[in-house]
Every structure is written in C-alpha cells, then in structure tokens.
Image (tube, rainbow, N blue to C red):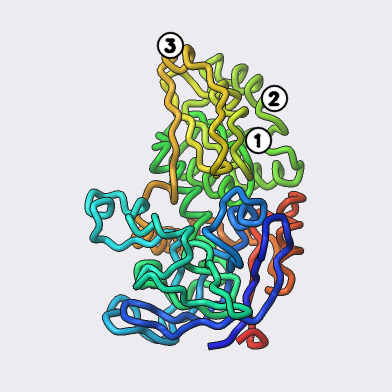
Amino acid sequence: MKTKGALIWEFNQPWTIEEIEIGAPRRNEVAIRMEAAGMCHSDHHLQTGGIPMAGFPVLGGHEGAGVVIEVGDGVEDVAVGDHVVLSFIPSCGKCPSCQSGLRNLCDLGALLLGGASATDGSFRITARGENVYPMSLLGTFAPYMVVHRSSVVKIDPSIPFEVACLVGCGVTTGYGSAVRTANIRPGEDVAIIGIGGLGISALQGAVNAGARHIFAVDPVPWKREQALKFGATHAYATTEEATAACAEITAGGMAKKVIVTVGEVRGGDVDLWMGITAKAGTCVLTAMGNLIDNQTTLNLAMLTLLQKNLQGTIFGGGNPHYDIPHLLSMYQVGKLNLDDMVTRQYRLEQVNDGYQDMLEGRNIRGVVRYTDADW
C-alpha cells in the first residue's frame, strides 16, 4: 500500500513527510492501521547519529498503538479488529534469551538497527524507489505498518490509543527500571535523574514500590513541578544540589537506588550519579548514550570500597508480552497515571514541532495522533 511517513535522509536534518510504499503482510506478519505514536527521545538520537541505523532513509517511531487490519499465514495471537501495542523490542519466546526469562533481550533484537524484516531479511518499505530503514523494525511515524508478530501485543480495546502507545517503550522501560532492575524495596530512598517520559514512569514505579524519599533531578522548573505532582518528595535542578540535599535528609545514607533517565547518557557524568548512590546501592542507567561513546569517568576505588553497583537495563528488564497489558491494567484501576503524561498531541506533519517541544522541556510525552485524514 502507499501511505506517508516521517523520514530522515541524513544526520542532523529535520523529519520530512513523504510518500512511502509498504508491502503486504507475509507469513507471521501483521498489518496495522496506526492510531497513535509516542515521541520518544530515542528517535531524536536517529537524527543526531547517536543511534545510527544501517542506512538512509530512516522511518522514525518505535512507540505505537493501532488496530489490526490484516494478518499473514501463521499468525494466531491476534486477529483483524484487535487493538494492539507495538513492542519496540520483539519477543519471540523461543530463542535462548527468551527461554532463559530475558524476553527483553530477545535475539531478534540484533536486527533492530538493520532495517530488514525479521521475517525473511527483505526490505518491506520503500521511498523514492529506495529501501527504507524503519526504527526498531517498526516505523510508527506512519499511518500504517506491517510488522513481525513478535512485536505485536494485544490489549483491552477500552484503553485510549494515545496512552496505550506509551507502554510500547517509555512507560514499560521506566517503570521496569524502578521495580524490576533497581528492585526498589519499601522504605528505600531513590533518586531519579531526568524527568521526561522515562523519568516520570520510573518515579511512578518508585512510588508504587513504597520508596521513602524520592529525589527528582531536572534543570527545567516545569518538569520539577511535574515530578512533585507525580509523587516525588523533593526536586532539584542539578545532581550536585540533589546530592547535597540527599546527604542531609538521609543523614549521609544517600539514595539506595538511582535511576538515570536523562535525554542522553554522557560518560563524564557517571561518577556524578554514583556519588548520590548509597553504599551497596545501585545506579541504573536506563537512558541511552551515543553508541561510539566509550569514555567514562568513574572512581573505581570507591566503586570497590563502597560496594556499589552500576547496572544497565533495556525495556525495564521485563517481558513485553506480559508487562504491556499488565501496566495498562494498572492504568485502568488508577494505579498508573498515563493520562497526565501526554502533554501534547500532534499531527504527523507537526513531528518536528513535537521534538522541538521535547528538547526545550515543554513535554513529558508528545504523541502523534492519526485521524481519518491520514488513512
């Protein structure tokens, strides 16, 4: 089918809305009419080269929700008319990683930046006669998509699409960073560095896990206000300010768990985040760094002597086919605030405005909302 999509053709250039052509679903594939797409910071990394795809043009978007319109042979998990969320990491359930319980590290994830279909290695999207590389094998910045069934998760049809799309990446990643990777326990003190979609999700995880003091850090005053609204007990503009306050409030105990959800992890800041981490505490790096950044500042003696842990995580360390519907069920009963995370909604043609709002600190999460005019 012919439709449109938000593409980038080289680094440090804006998104352009252009005609694209998407192939029909093959065996084990699902065609979806998109309803909403979350605007995650990781898609901005595609523009800067922080996350380099294997080629250009790139079709952006890896958070999304929509309705199944066609299924290929072998697809039994979903049917036409089902409401679904797209998991930004596929989860096949069969590879060694999935079988060992690490479904967020599914072996199909090795294909995510290559652009070729997980089904047969072919390119399924073209623009101007050239192969298109969809972000995370998805490309939610288009009104239609065809994806492998391992990336499709059925959801309750009563859930609004504009909030459902958020659990395809940001909410699941941030919340899981708190409750699973960091394993926050009741009464522990927590610091969250960076208050965007990931940070607010991690904050809600810390609240639900029973954290005592929650120190939120963000340079944008409005985001600090949002952090307090979502349950943070203290908010500071810099990690240095938070470290000094944390030392006073905890009588030198510091934060047992620290979750880093900034826009981009920089190696020179790691020791700063470890400084607010308690003895035998854990600092979780949830945010992405540049793939070529391999220089990190870290006091190795203090890492050893204070028995601290520096932990990476992806997709919240969980199982997307379980976590996505589970988190949405929490939303349904009022235990997870997704409505207030959606700051603004945009048309696809406004995608550059949405990312400018994100970079200037005006959004917790922007969402592209599709309408009849797009389909």
Residue at 64% from the left image edge and 82% from the top image edge: 19
Q: Mark on residue 305?
A: 3
| Residues under numbered marks 1 and 2 in contact, where contact means CB atoms less than 8 Å apart | yes
Q: Mark on residue 217?
A: 1
Q: Residue 280 location, x and y as percent?
A: 41, 20
Quarter of the rendering occupied by the C terminus: bottom right
Q: Amino acid at mark 1?
A: Val
The tag earlier along the polypeptide, 3 or 2, is 2
Q: Nearer the viewer, residue 131 or 189?
A: 131
Which is closer to the viewer, label 3 or label 1? 3
The tag earlier along the polypeptide, 1 or 2, is 1
Query: Is residue 122 toward the left or the right of residue 196 in the image?
Result: left
Question: Label 1: few (<14), some or many (≥20) within 10 Å?
Answer: many
To which residue does mark 2 refer? 241
Residue at 27% from the left image edge and 54% from the top image edge: 98
Q: CA distance from mark 3 to mark 2?
A: 24 Å
| Residues under numbered marks 3 and 2 in contact, where contact means CB atoms less than 8 Å apart | no
